[in-house]
Amino acid sequence: MRRRFIQVLALAPVWLAVAVPVGAQRAAFDEREVKAVFLLNFVQFVEWPPTAFTSPESPIVIGVIGDDPFGRLLDEVVAGEVIRGRRITIARYRRVEDVKACHVLYISRSEAPMYAHILTTLSSQPTLTVGETASFTARGMIRFLTEGSRIRLEVNVEAVKTAGLTINSNLLRAARIVNTPRG
């Protein structure tokens, strides 16, 4: 199984340039794997301010809040990964108040009624927020979007800027840009 993840990881940067057909994914791996790999690859395309880390040895934390659609899959995808000299770790949260030093946070569909509270609470933190529901990028940053048989990305660039993050232009070129004023 680890070998399959390595193969998926090797192809992940290509997915940023083109949308991934869901039908093709099912032949080799499932949609959860693609999204788990995207979460890891976002780390390569996002820059955090130095204040996002407590020390040079601090890991990059990918978190999940709410019902976890990935299970052990996400742990397996990031196992042993080091990006920009930092280990990648996974954290799972039940409440937004528990989120302290998280760099990429997948906000589960189960938390949709709490989006406003979660995103307001995180607004002062340099945390890249990722979700899937239609209303997510009204305040969140990146949305996994299924169009027909393809997984695409939708990015709220204003929310990203407000959090003090910088997204590489390669990721932005592959995404649908949503400029929603924060407020």
Image (tube, rainbow, N blue to C red):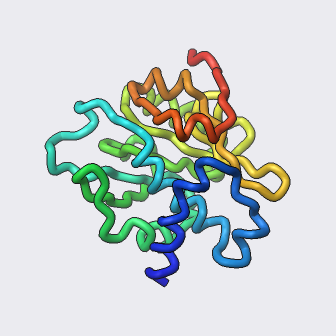
Report if residue 24 is visible in the image: yes
Residue at the location (33% across, 64% down)? 81
Residue 175 locus on image (x, y percent): 64, 38
Query: On screen, 28 above or below 157?
Result: below
> What residue appears at the point 67 percent right and 50 percent down from the top-left corner?
18
* 45 vs 59, nearest the viewer: 45
Q: Which quadrant holds the C terminus?
A: top right
- Relative placement, left or right, of 183 versus 25 is left
Picture coordinates of residue 168, whole percent (x, y): 46, 35
- The residue lying at 43 percent from left, 53 percent from top is 63
Give the image quarter of residue 113: top right
Residue 80 position, x and y percent, is: 30, 69
Total numbered labels placed on residues in the image? 0
The residue that appears at 85% across and 53% down in the rendered structure is: 148
Residue 122 shown left or right of residue 169 in the figure: left
Which of the 4 image quadrants contains residue 76?
bottom left
Q: Is residue 132 visible?
A: no
Please identify the residue farthest to the right as the structure is shown. Answer: 148
Q: Position of residue 89 (x, y in %)?
A: 33, 60
Q: Is residue 175 above or below residue 42?
A: above
8 and 88: which is toward the camera = 8
Left or right, 13 with reference to 93: right
